[in-house]
Image (cartoon, helix red, strand yellow):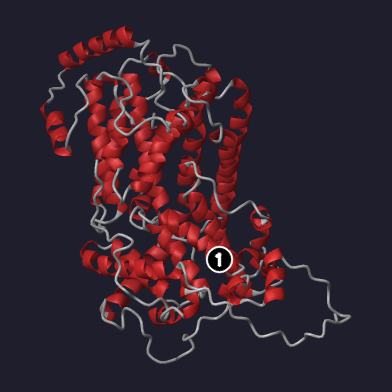
Amino acid sequence: MGRSSSTPQIGTFTQSPFEGSLSKDDHGMAMTREPSPENTDGHQRPDTAVQVTEPMGSLYEVTRLRNIRSNQARVSRPGLESSGQVEDFIARGIIDEAEAEELYNTFHNSLNHYLWVGIEQIHTSLTSVRRSSQLLTATILTVTALHIPTSTKTFDNCYREFLSLISSSMFSRYHSIDDVRALCIAAFWLSDVSWKLSGHAIRVATELDVHNAFFKALEGDREAFLRARLWYMLYVCDHHFSIAYGRPPMISESLQIREHEQFLKLPFADALDYRILSQVALFQIMTRIHDTFAEMRLPQHDNVRAVLSLQHFPRMRHFNLEIDQWRVKWQSLQRHNNFIGTFPPKGIILYSYFAKLQLNSFAIRGISTSQEDMATERKEFVDTAISAAMSILTFVLQEADMRRALVGTPLYVHTMIAFASVFLLNVATIKSQGAPLGRHFNIDAQLTWHNVEAMVKLLRSMVVSDRHLIQHVAAGLDTMLRKAKSVASGMPVPRGSSEENCIASRQYDHSQADQSRQKSRQQEFWNDNRNDISRSMFVDPGIAGSSMEVGDNFVDDDHMMFMNETMLYDAFGTDTTNEVYNLLSNQFSC
C-alpha cells in the first residue's frame, strides 16, 4: 500500500547555504588546536573556587582539539555581524520580499500567539529575524504559508528551502538560540518532520547550554530567562510528540522542570509564561501516568496482563484528581489574549479533556469484547474516557474561539481530536455490534456519528492550505465514519478506494425494518462466533504490534472487523498524517 504526498521530501532539496557556506571543519575531521588560555602557569588563584568539569571537558582541556570541544555551538557564527543587506533566500528571489513581509505579519498577529515562543519580545520585524537566523526566517514563512490556502506554491518553495537549511544544520558547528526557536516552531506545525525536528532542537539547545539557563535566570539575568523559557517550550514540544505516541521523552524531569513555579516569581514572567508552565505541569502528570500504565509491556498473545487490575484503580483515581486540580489551578491563571481571545483559559479545559481521555482509556485496554462482566469501578473509568472524548468534540464544535483556534493550534490538538473521534467510533461500533462488552458502554452511536460528522465538516471548512494536517484528518475521519456506519448496519466493511466506500454507504437503505433485521443478524453472528473473538480492540501495542502485519484482520468476518491496522492505514497512512497514524496505531492497532 503506497504512500503519496505532494510535500517536498528530505533529500530532494536544492543547494542552499546555511547562514553562509559550511567551513572545512564541517566536512572533515580537522584535528586543529585551539589557542591556549592566557592563564597557563598552572597556579590556582586564591580567590577562585575549585571546578570539576565533565569528562569531555577534561579531554578538551588536555588536547585543545576543536572537534571534541564541548558546546561548540557557543562559538559565534561568522559573517552575521554585517549591518548590510542580508544574503538569504529572500534576497535570492525564492520568495518576493513583499510577500515575505505579509507572511511575517500574519504569523506575528495570529500563529505566534497560539504557541509560546514569544517572538514578538525578541524580534520586532522581519528584518530583525533575517539578520538573526535564516532558519528562523524560513520556518516562520513556511508554517504561515501552510495556513493560507492561496499560498501553496509559496509553501512548497519555502519548505524546500527550510529542508535544505535543516539538512545543512545537522553537520554545522555553528548554531544560535534562534535556530533552536525555529526548530521548535517547525516541530509544532510541520507534521511530517515534527518528531525529527523536536529531537534535533533538543540536541542543539543542549549544545548551547540552554538546559542550565534556569539557574542564571533565578539571579535576574533576562537573556538567561529567555533561554530557560525556551527549554520549557522544548519540554512541552518533546512531550507532545512522545507520551501520546508511546515514545520515551528525551528531556528528563530535571530541577528546572520540578521547580517550574519558581520561574513565575521572576520579574520578567508574564502571561506567556503562565501558559507555557501550565503545559509543563500537565505533562509532568502525563509522564507519571505513562510510566505507571503505558509501560506495562506484555508477553505475546497474553492479553490478561494488559488489563488493569483492581489494585491499579486507586492510582488511576488519584491521577484523575490531579488532572482536575491542574485544571482548577491553571485555568484561573490564564488571561484573555487580544489576538486569540479566550483560547488561553479555554485551552486549559480542552487539555484537561485530552488528559482524561488518555488516562481513563487505559481502563479498557486488553479487555476482550466477549467479556460479559465489568467491575463497577472499571466501568466508571470507561465512562469517564467516553465522556472526555465526547466533551472534546462538543467543546470544539460549540465554542467560537475554539473553532477559530483549529487553524492556528499546534499538531497535538488536531491529533487528539482525531484520537477522541476514533475512540468514540470504536466504542460505539463494539456496542452496536451486540458484543457483550458493549453492553457496559454508556454511549449513543447516533450521537457519536452526528458529532464526528460535524467535526469532519468543521475541519473541512477551515481555510488552510491543502498541505495542512487538518484537511487530511478530516478525510481520514470521514473514511472511519463511513466504515463504522457500514459495520453497525450489518454490511461488510467497504474495501477499496474511498469513493467506492462512499458509494457503498450511500446505496444502503437504513429503514427501521432493515435495522431491526440487521440487529438480529448481528446478535446471531456474535453468538456463533464469540469464541473466536477473543482479542480486544483496545490492545497495548506490546501485545501483538510486533507480529501483526499491515493487512491482518481483527477477525475473519467483515461484519465484525473494525479498527485494525489496515483501516487506520487506509484513513491516516499518508506522509502528512503519519504522526496521527502513529498515535492511533499505538492506541488501537491489534
Up-down relation of residue 474 to residue 429 (above or below):
below
Snapshot quadrant of residue 586? top left
Q: Secondary structure at mark 1?
A: helix
Quarter holding residue 188: bottom left
Residue 571 appears in the rendering = yes
Determine whether, in the image, residue 295 is placed left or right of residue 446: right
Q: Residue at x 63, y 70 (%)?
A: 70
Residue 80 pos. (x, y %): 47, 85
Q: Image point 24% across, 44% down: which residue?
A: 2
**431 up-or-down from 325: above or below:** above
**Vertical placement of residue 363 versus 186, above or below:** above
Does the image show residue 459?
A: no
Q: Quadrant of the C terminus?
A: top left
Q: Position of residue 198 (x, y in %)?
A: 47, 58
Q: Quadrant of the N terminus?
A: top left
> Residue 495 location, x and y as percent?
19, 30
Frontmost residue, 340 versus 195: 195
Amino acid type shown at disc 1: Ala
- Circle 1: is it few (<14), some (14-19), or many (20+) Cα within 10 Å? many
Q: Label 1: which residue? A: 205
